[in-house]
Image (tube, coloured by chain):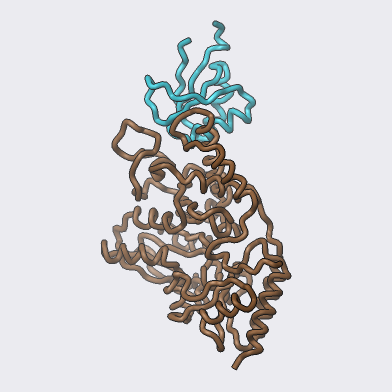
Chain colours: A cyan, B brown
Amino acid sequence: MSESSDKCLLLFQSIHKVMQAERIIVSLGIVYQIVPVPKEFSSECGMCIEIDCSDIEVIVPEFQFNNIFYNKVKVDV
Amino acid sequence: MGNFYFDNSATSYPKPPEVAEYINEYLKGGGTYGRSAYDRVVAVSRVVENTRLLLANLIGTKHSDHIFFTSNSTHALNLAIKGLSYPKKRILISPLEHNAVTRPVLYLQQTFGVEYDILPHQSDGFIDLDATGKLDLKLYDLCIVNHVSNVNGVIQPLAELKALLRSVPLLVDASQSAGYIPIEADSWNIDMLALTGHKGLMGPTGTGCLFARNPELISPLIHGGTGSRSDSFLMPDFFPDRFEAGTPNVLGIYGLFGALSAKVLPHFDTHTFKDLLEQIEQLKSFKLKRSASFNRQAFLFSVISDNYTPSELSNQLFKRFGIETRSGLHCAPLAHKSLGTFPKGTVRISLSKYHNPNDLNYLYTALKELDYERK
């Protein structure tokens, strides 16, 4: 599998932050989906965001600007 | 048929059609907030968080995560008043406070010995800034102010007051101002603000929020599940979760989202409203209870009559003209004491953005007819 199609999960502290992050991701035109937080990760809310790992670098500056803190986990396929 | 409902300070009527539309959408769609990740839950979570964002925009703050949903202003005020600490055991309140403030304040007094003083004010309850500036404000833990009086509609000078208070936190009751007049929480440096969704915002009952600039200073009023940090027996230390235990009133929040999305503009202008007040002031048997300055007047006021008690006048207006008003003390005995209308109270007339000039003229005509019958 190519690096560009690797999937990453973005984990947030709260639903408020998930929704805030989703608005930013939508505004950037990035493909994403909201999925349940896998139980092996510390679940701080019921949902997280899955994106292509290659899109992370586009998102990071926007998240930093909006004080959105997250944990990134690469998904094993 | 005109709109003769003049009790919008109690609750707004009519509501924008979007309120029922969104409530209906939720009833058809279902789902809870943030407790899972299937589409129904995500859709609900989006609406809840977009509503939070709209409320933040409405009150002029960038800190949407510091907006906490409550069931009304009273709940929001209790959260703030009972959640703060009072090392100096003394607070300031305005002379026009509602029982939503005075009762929790009396609870503090009786339970913890926290005393209160009333801000210096003019005869219409408007805060006397010069006199306030001469107080030793270092003595106080908190100042609470009703932005717009629910009795005479006086608008208080929040930005100027906060400039005097400096480090003394200011808690604002925006029950009667939100949706009617601008609020700029960040530029005015407001510390905390409580509002309800069903009055000026024209949403459903059972909705409201507290904004807190420094929420870490407030202890939660309600403890329980938040859908976050589920492995912990303690409330989360992040916001808004810390103050939102339990499933929120999603049905109400959908309706509030509809109301905030509607962006209803007033169907009358301030000149028409000013004309109404001036016309009523010409009626000899009536006395207005309003702001001394029209520039500080919101779209509500009270009247008292030489001929009728407040309850009689309210009844005459309804039985003979179909005009709905509220008589009595409006849950604000302190305000009525400050205005000299305690214990009888007044008849309160409170407008909706949906009122048009004909509705206001109808109200005046009814009062004029009752005035002709004066003894």
Q: Residue furthest top?
A: A1
User: Percent x, y for residue B265?
Assistant: 68, 57
Identify the residue shown where x is 63% and y is 73%: B322
Tell me which corner region of the image, top left, top right, bottom left or bottom right, holds residue B274: bottom right
Q: Nearer the viewer, residue A68 or B24?
A: B24
User: Percent x, y for residue B311?
Assistant: 51, 79
Q: Residue furthest bottom?
A: B375
Tell me which corner region of the image, top left, top right, bottom left or bottom right, holds residue B134: bottom left
Could you tell me if residue B260 is visible in this image? Answer: no
B194 vs B49: above or below: below
B61 vs B366: above or below: above
User: Percent x, y for residue B244?
Assistant: 41, 44
In-image side of B83 versus B250 (left or right): left
User: Percent x, y for residue B105?
Assistant: 35, 64
Could you tell me if residue A32 is visible in this image? Answer: yes
Identify the residue shown where x is 60% and y is 51%: B259
Q: Nearer the viewer, residue B343 or B67?
A: B343
In-image side of B266 versus B344 (left or right): right
A60 vs B52: above or below: above
In the picture, the quarter occupied by the N terminus of chain B is bottom right
In-image side of B209 versus B350 (left or right): left
In the picture, the quarter occupied by the C terminus of chain B is bottom right
Q: Nearer the viewer, residue B10 or B210?
A: B10
Looking at the rendered structure, the number of numbered marks drawn on it comes to 0
Identify the residue shown where x is 55% and y is 23%: A33
